[in-house]
Amino acid sequence: MSKMQKIILGSLMVLVLLTGLAWKIFAPRVLAGVQGLLLSQVNSSINGRIEIEAVDFSLLGAAVLKKVFLFDQNGANVAAGEEIDIRYKIGDLLAGRFGIDSISKISADKLTLKLEIDKDGRWSLQKMIRPQTERKTEFRGSILVKDTAVSVTTPTWRREFSEISGELDYDGSPAIAVDLKGKMGASSIAASGQWIPDDKTQLTLKVDAMDLTEILALLPGSAGAPQLKAGTVKNVQGTVLQTKDSVQMNGEGTLAGLAMNFQGLAITDGAAKLNLQGKKVALQDASAVIDGNKLTVTGAVDFTPQSPVLALQVVAPSVNLANFSGGAAAVSGIASVQADISGTIDKPLANGSFKLPSGQFEETAFSDAEGTFSYAGDAMNLGKVTFKAMGGTLGLSGTVAGKPGRINLKVNGQNVDGSLLTNNGLTGRLDFNATVAGEGGADSMTTSGTFSLGSGSVGEYAVANAAGTFRKQGRRLDLSNVGVTLSGQRLSVNGAVTLAVKGAAPQLNLQIASGGMSTTVFNPNSALRGNIAFQTTVTGTPDNNQARGNFQIASGALGELAFSGASGGFSYAGGVLTLVGGRAQCLGGTITLNGTVVPKTMEYHQQVNGQNIDAAQLTDRDVQGRADFAASISGVGDWDKANADGNFKMNSGSVKGIAFNGLTGNFAKRGRQTEFTNLKFNMLGGLASGTGETEGEYVHLVITPNAVANTALSILTGRTLQPQDLRVRFRGPNG
């Protein structure tokens, strides 16, 4: 070192010592003036006031403000700091022109701030700065913060930020360079970029993880917004662009652990990649579980309007329909569903399709179901739905709405197994078209429509070409205008059937009529021949039924006994047919019948009365005249083999050409043999009595004439006869 260098260095050291000595002497007086100047300068430039408990200045342009408090124009404390370090231009301070532009750096540790943003997007601190009328001063230093806490309040939300550290650089003012890190709740946040108050702000944000509620709070709500229970957005990266008129947010992140209630559905395990463009959120690789059913989602939600707008595509490969039945009729099965979701979040719309390999509606199993649907409000509209059930193919369309499930459906079926449809009351294949309407479960639904059946059976009877209309509510099935061919004979059916349930047989209450049914329908071996027209009410079960009605037979035969104009009433129960008031034209007169017949065996027990019967038709013996009789007849099969007991009378007639009148008597028929007793009649001018019997082709009579009749016989024979029994034997009509 040269001698001159040593002199200069020594002089500087002396100067420093002298300056330090002068500062020590004059500092207290200077500091008091500077502190007053500082407070005066700051308070004159803000709407509010600042309070500083103490200021420590250094000779090198540093000041430490201790216990600093900032109050707004209303006297509310909006900032506080234990210690704030300020670096400044010492010359400006000594010259008495200290201002905000004199500060080069502000460092604050453990600062607390309360910030508010009004509906116009202006910060509360901005509104505290007064317009400058004198020399324009501008801060061009930097602000460094450490472990700072900030409370931010907006018109719609309030959040607390903590552990904020970083720098605000005003060197490019009015543009402020931002580089901050901190936490919002448990979420770590980093922000960097440029902030220009009252102009344009662009910041880059990074968030490691944030509760979804924090994000939704920034977006518009609505009456139909989801009821959020849980959810986290991770690895958020994005930008915030703020202008005088708007705030634009762009970014991306990952959603995990979403749980919420939406439109009455429980959504859990939600996950997605999120892309935010303004207030429009796009979803990629999204999935969730709704009421236990997993689905994937793509699309976007636009939060710009008051009620966010949906544009989503949903794919659900395994939807458990049992989870969606609610109070409606129980439907089960695992379906695959594809749908486009549109509309708003409070009024969503859906259009889609589904496939259901197998399922069950109430107690009816079905398979191979597929179709389309749309959803609006609380109504599900089904279209072009086809499925297999009850051995046939069915289709439906219509609406299922709300809870407890209002249903209005058009249903058609082809080749449906009648035994499955009616729980074994009917066999055969049915086609039908019907409307199903009602609210609640299947028992409260009303089904009405038309049906047709090619061939089948009801109970033990074969049916064919059946067609008509029906109405079903619960287990009651009403039939009307039903035409059916029963074993080749045409019938009409009206009435009601209570369908079987839990093993119970169907219950019948039917009105059945026929214009002419062959008697062989009921028993092919029946001795009764003819076409029966009847009207009857049938009750009971298909296998154990009862009937009551009336009948007409224009012409027919019972064995070899022909008749015409038959009519009467009947009842049927337990396999027994009871005739009441039966009437027919037979044997030249009128026959009435009352009694029972077993159709399967043709066993019969009848009370038979004859009026004005032609005796010549009643027997092949040479008997002429008109007879009345009353008899109890029983037997099985042919009438000729019947047993009968009764009485008869003839007002007049002849036997083998011998006239008589006033004939009365009793008879007992056993097969082809008949015994006559208590015969009384007038013959040949006298009274006679007798007995007799038929024996094959022969008739045996024992006649006891009185005296007058005996005299007549003596004249006829030319012999003198004593009163005695007259035995007569003849064979056949001419024997």
Image (cartoon, grey):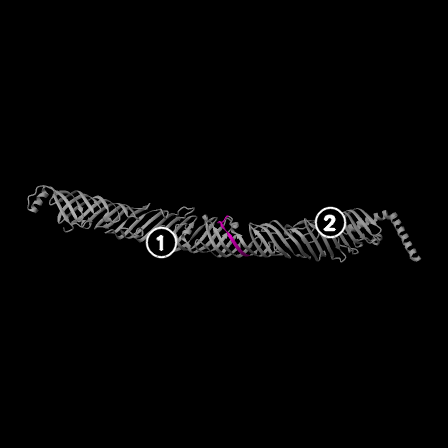
Name the side, left or right, on which 523 lies relative to 257.
left
Q: Earlier in the sequence, mark 1 or mark 2?
A: 2
Callout 2 secondary element: strand
- Give the percent coordinates (x, y) of residue 585: 23, 50
- Chief secondary structure of the magenta portion: strand
Q: Determine which residue is flagged by label 2.
A: 148
Q: Is residue 173 magenta?
A: no
Name the side, left or right, on which 531 lies relative to 90.
left
Q: Determine which residue is flagged by label 1.
A: 463
Residue 622: numbered disc: none
Name the side, left or right, on which 131 lies relative to 227.
right
> Residue sitting at 59 percent across and 51 percent down?
269
Q: Is residue 333 magenta?
A: yes
Q: What residue range appears in magenta? A: 327-339
Would you place residue 507 above or below residue 381 in this image?
above
Q: Nearer the viewer, residue 324 or 144?
A: 324
Give the amino acid type for the residue marked by disc 2 in the picture.
Answer: Thr
> Residue sitting at 54 percent across and 53 percent down?
318
Quadrant location of residue 299? Answer: bottom right
Q: Nearer the viewer, residue 470 or 587?
A: 587
Q: Quadrant of the image for the N terminus?
A: bottom right
Tell how many labels: 2
Callout 1 secondary element: strand
- Give the percent coordinates (x, y) of residue 417: 41, 53
Q: Residue furthest front?
A: 696
Give the amino acid type for the residue marked by disc 1 in the picture.
Answer: Val
Can residue 57 be seen by looking at this rendering?
yes
State which mark lies toward you, 1 or 2.
1
Name the side, left or right, on which 670 lies relative to 61.
left
- Give the percent coordinates (x, y) of residue 370: 49, 56
- Give the percent coordinates (x, y) of residue 277: 64, 58
Can residue 377 be seen by looking at this rendering?
no
